Image (cartoon, rainbow, N blue to C red):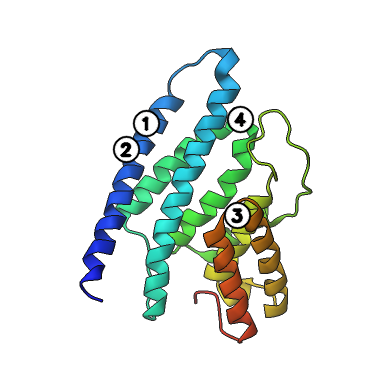
Amino acid sequence: MQASLPGKADGQQSALGHCERASSHLWNSLNMSSGVSSAVLSSMMQLLACDLLLSLRTSLWQKQASSSQALGETYHASASELTGFQRDLGSLRKLAHGFRPAYRKVFLHEATVRLMAGASPTRTHQLLEHSLRRRTAQSSKQGEVDTLPGQRERATAILLACRHLPLSFLSSPGQQAVLLAEAARTLEKVGDKRSCNDCQQLIVKLSGGTALAAS
């Protein structure tokens, strides 16, 4: 078991290294002027890249956090992890100024970086609430990059809240299970099998009376 740990650490650092290089290219892209005819397409690609980077950084952090929780410990992201996340979050904010589909993702990732840093849960909960507000699925409009606008952010916010917020910020176990089941269906639709499985595991823990949230 111990022999496998260095390999996992090396894989984590390698993934973060790729994130840093991609992050630099993204920032350069955002600071380059482009023709009006290609502005929407460029923004869509930049949003896709930015959201992917932030989601990958979140996934890497959650793997570390889950390992620590299994040992009864609390894991907060390192300074370098937070710096990288903040840089990509800055890219997302910059993109959101002129591209509305990016705006709704800002609240979710702002909440995530607070969870990573172990910041006060009150403001984190408020940020997650922006994504938790139910949005009806509408047909995609010009410039939309999701087939279910806002629904993936809502599903991810549910998962983050149930996994990381203190119990005092959460609803009853029964209500949590209903929300997690909704989140699992959405995440399955968009092809995020890992997060869907995480929701299902939390539902199982809830049914067994196991506390889900970090204290």
**How would you rate the neighbour count of disc 2 (Cα within 10 Å): few for under 14, some for 14-19, many for 20 or more?**
few
Relative image position of residue 206 (x, y in whole percent): 62, 80
Q: CA–CA distance between discs 1 and 3?
A: 28 Å
Give the quadrant of the N terminus.
bottom left
**How would you rate the neighbour count of disc 1 (Cα within 10 Å): few for under 14, some for 14-19, many for 20 or more?**
few
Q: CA–CA distance between discs 2 and 3?
A: 28 Å
Secondary structure beneath dot 1 equals helix
Q: Earlier in the sequence, mark 2 or mark 3?
A: 2
**What is the three-letter code of the residue carrying label 3?**
Leu
Closer to us: 187 or 81: 187
Q: CA–CA distance between discs 4 and 1?
A: 19 Å
**How would you rate the neighbour count of disc 4 (Cα within 10 Å): few for under 14, some for 14-19, many for 20 or more?**
some
Residue at (32%, 49%) from the top-left corner? 16
Res. 99 mark: 4
- Say which residue label 1 marks: 25
- Say which residue label 3 marks: 127
Relative image position of residue 44 (x, y in whole percent): 57, 31
Residue 21 vertical placement versus 192 (above, below): above
Closer to us: 113 or 102: 102
Res. 21 mark: 2
Residue at (29%, 56%) from the top-left corner? 11
